[in-house]
Structures are given as C-alpha cells and as structure tokens.
C-alpha cells in the first residue's frame, strides 16, 4: 500500500484541482479529502451538520466546505456555484447502516434509506455535472452488498445494485465526463455507528476472520481508489471494488 501511495503522489495529477466531496467530513469521505489535500489539490467537504464540517476543516488546512441538506434541492443546486470551479465530484454521503428484515420494512423506511444514498446522489450529480470543468470526473459510492447479500440486507443490497446501474447509465449520458463508483467491503468507519461498541468490534472481528486479507479495511485503503478514479483518464462506467476479497468468500 505504501508503494502505491508514493507512485500516485509523485504523479501529482490532481495538483491545483478542486474536488467537491459530498459526505466528506467523516469516514471514507474524510480520508478522500486528506488524500486530495496531500496531492496539492483543494478538497471541498460538504455535510448536513455544521459541527461536522467545522471539525473536518480544522483538520484539513487549506480546504473549503459548507453545509448542505441533500433532501433540499435548493441547497443541492446551490453547490454548483457556491465554491467556484469544480474539477471532480465525489459522493460518499450516507447515514449509518441498520439491518432491516423484510417483515419490518415500510415504504417510509425504504424512502428514508434511499433519500441520501440514491436520490441524494442523483440530485447532486444533476446539479454539479454541468458545472464540472473539462476533463472532470464523478465518483459515486456503492458496496458489495449487492454481490453478497444476506438476511436483513435487502435495503443495502438494493441501493448498491441501483447505484451500480446508475453509474453505468450516467457514464453514457454524461460522456465525456468520466463516471465511476467505488465499492468498499467492510470498512472501519462511522457507517457502523448504529451498532454498540461491543457488537461493532465483534462484527469487525468476524468479518476479518472470513476475509482473505484477514482484516477489515480502513478508510485510507479505500480513499486510494477514489484518487485513482479521478487521476486516470480512460476508465468510465467502472465499479472499482476494494473489499479485502469479500466477494471471493
């Protein structure tokens, strides 16, 4: 991992770029922001909580950011002009996961789950895509749940499958803008905050034992995939899987 990081940093293809990261104040999004900053680019972190934005900015000197409620399209559409020119869009926003069996699902539960991860992604892309500078890219976030679903994962698997299809469709519709997605496996991040500390650690330990790499991922592992999606120039419609071998076992 260290060698790959050095190679990407030396290429410095993001230098001078401006990267809007929706969901960039914690977990994978914050790790992407750090990686962008290390490459002499400017991360612009957006979240719905002002305290989260300020905390992220305190740890990202030279970065920019602000608050945006993804359920309010007026706020979303304002992102296109709020921060000046934008070269790349990264979407990592999502509430903590909770497993819901089919018997407990209602339309309201489904609507709430999709409101940020899927509807929010569509709205942000719709607002930002026309404002991207030439050569820009869009990177969404999906997951391996659609490849390896389990009991209680109906919502997670469905939204991941929908995001995979969205990525490929946008790659065609928005061409020549490059549109890709990163598919993490189990990553140590606030995504699992709904579990208490003991249950979360038990889950991580169990997942690590089952994986070929014998560990769950860290946000920094996955951040490199987003950097690659921005720096490379010829891939679009791709789902970049960084899952520790989840789909193999």
Image: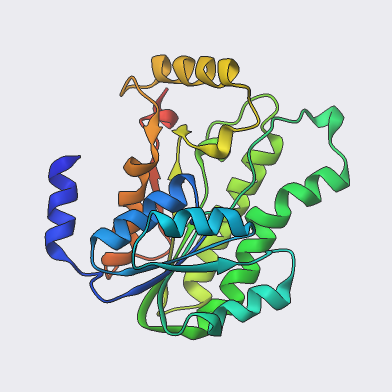
Q: Taking 189 as reference, is 101 above or below it?
A: above
Which residue is found at the position 57% from the left and 57% from the top?
Answer: 165
Residue nearer the viewer, 43 or 106: 43
What residue lies at 38% left-to-right and 58% top-to-bottom?
A: 33
- Left or right: 72, with 221 as reference point: right
Using residue 53 as the reference point, say whether residue 109 is left or right of it. right
Q: Residue 69 occupies which quadrant of the picture?
A: bottom right
At horizontal 71% and vertical 52% (from top left) the residue drawn is 114
What residue is rendered at 72% in x and 78% in y? 74
User: How many numbered marks have been drawn onto this rendered protein structure?
Assistant: 0
**Quadrant for the C terminus in the image:** top left
* Residue 210 or residue 12, whichever sits in front: 12
Q: Nearer the viewer, residue 123 or 236?
A: 123
Rendered image quadrant of residue 176: bottom left
Q: How far across and how far down the image is residue 94, in percent?
A: 61, 49
- Foreground: 197 or 89? 197
Above or below — where is 71 with respect to 26?
below
- Position in image of residue 164 (x %, y %): 54, 53
Residue 245, horizontal then vertical, whole percent: 37, 30
Q: Position of residue 143 (x, y in %)?
A: 51, 43
Relative vertical location of residue 16 with respect to residue 148 in this rendering, above or below:
below
Model colouring: rainbow
On screen, residue 27 above or below 91: above
Horizontally, residue 74 falls left or right of residue 212, namely right
């Amino acid at each position: 991992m260290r060698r790959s990081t050095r190679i990407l940093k030396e290429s410095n293809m993001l230098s001078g770029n401006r990267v809007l990261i929706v969901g960039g104040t914690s977990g994978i999004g914050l790790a992407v922001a750090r990686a962008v900053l290390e490459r002499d680019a400017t991360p612009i972190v957006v979240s719905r909580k002002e305290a989260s934005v300020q905390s992220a900015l305190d740890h990202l000197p030279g970065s920019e950011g602000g608050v945006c409620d993804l359920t309010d399209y007026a706020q979303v559409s304002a992102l296109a002009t709020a921060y000046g020119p934008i070269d790349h869009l990264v979407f990592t926003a999502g509430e903590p996961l909770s497993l819901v069996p089919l018997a407990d699902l209602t339309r309201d539960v489904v609507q709430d789950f999709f409101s940020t991860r899927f509807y929010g992604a569509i709205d942000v892309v719709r607002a930002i895509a026309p404002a991207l500078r030439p050569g820009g890219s869009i990177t969404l976030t999906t997951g391996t749940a659609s490849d390896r679903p389990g009991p209680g994962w109906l919502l997670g698997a469905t939204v991941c499958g929908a995001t995979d299809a969205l990525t490929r469709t946008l790659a065609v519709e928005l061409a020549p803008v490059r549109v890709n997605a990163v598919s993490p496996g189990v990553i140590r991040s606030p995504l699992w905050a709904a579990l208490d500390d003991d249950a979360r650690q038990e889950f991580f330990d169990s997942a690590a034992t089952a994986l070929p790499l014998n560990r769950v991922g860290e946000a920094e592992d996955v951040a490199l995939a987003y950097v690659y999606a921005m720096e490379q120039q010829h891939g679009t419609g791709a789902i970049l899987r960084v899952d520790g071998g989840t789909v193999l076992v």
